[in-house]
Image (cartoon, grey):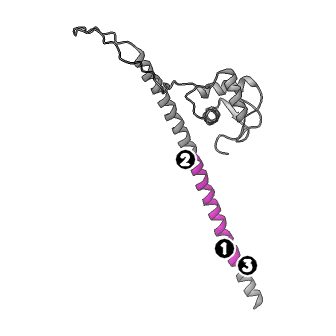
Amino acid sequence: MADNTLRAALDSARAQLEGAEAEVARLKTDLREAVERKTHLERVISALEDFLDDAAVLTDYESEVPDETPDESPREMPRQPTFEFEQSTPVRKKWPSTAMVGELVNDLGRAVHRDEVVGLFNDRYGIPPTWENPRNTLGNALLRAWERGLIERLDPDYFAPRGHEVAMSRGGQ
């Protein structure tokens, strides 16, 4: 009778193991799909940010282009301003930071820590005054450069020139 009880316990444990393995397989699939969805959304966000930056540059450019159509209305004498106005908020200009950090890392020819990139970027290009958090801005540019295949990512903090031997997969960390 003890053998029957042990066999029943063994059968029950095996059935529970099969159920657990099936759940693990399902969770792995769910995780893979979530990572793919996350990667897709990061790329969409990056593309939209780039689009908005490009649109800002275009808007700035269009506001600088003089209207070449002749004005047929009677001309008025321009009024003299009563005070000077200085714009306190700088106009945002598009910096191709993704391409710039890709070029910087590839020109270095070695692995580099993300914090080192900030100093090197400043030395080579300067930091725009409109960047409130250059470390964050350049960290995002490094990730975009990696996602676009411009550079390799060795781990969350180190990046290397394109073609470097030891790199993380682009599918996820």
- The mark found on residue 159 in the picture is none
- Which residue is identified by label 2? 37
Q: Distance between the residues labelled 3 and 2?
A: 40 Å
In the image, is residue 32 part of the stretch drawn in magenta? yes
Q: In the structure shown, which secondary structural element does the residue marked by tag 3 occupy?
A: helix
Image spot of residue 30 (x, y percent):
58, 55
Residue type at mark 2 is Arg
Closest to the observer: 172 or 62? 62
In the image, is residue 46 part of the stretch drawn in magenta? no
Q: Is residue 34 left or right of residue 157?
A: left
- Residue at 30 percent of width and 10 percent of height: 78
Q: Distance between the residues labelled 3 and 1?
A: 9 Å
- Residue at 67 percent of width and 26 percent of height: 121
Image spot of residue 68 (x, y percent):
33, 9
Residue type at mark 1 is Ala
Q: Is residue 35 left or right of residue 154?
A: left
Residue type at mark 3 is Leu
Q: Is residue 161 left or right of residue 149?
A: right
Image spot of residue 111 (x, y percent):
76, 32
- Residue at 70 percent of width and 76 percent of height: 13
The rendered magenta stretch, by its main secondary structure, is classed as helix
- Which residue is identified by label 3? 10
Give the magenta part as a residue range.
Answer: 10-37
Say above or below: 25 vs 127.
below
Name the residue furthest bottom. 1
Of pointers 3 and 1, the one earlier in the residue sequence: 3
- The mark found on residue 15 in the picture is 1
Q: Disc 3 vs disc 1: Cβ atoms closer than 8 Å?
A: no
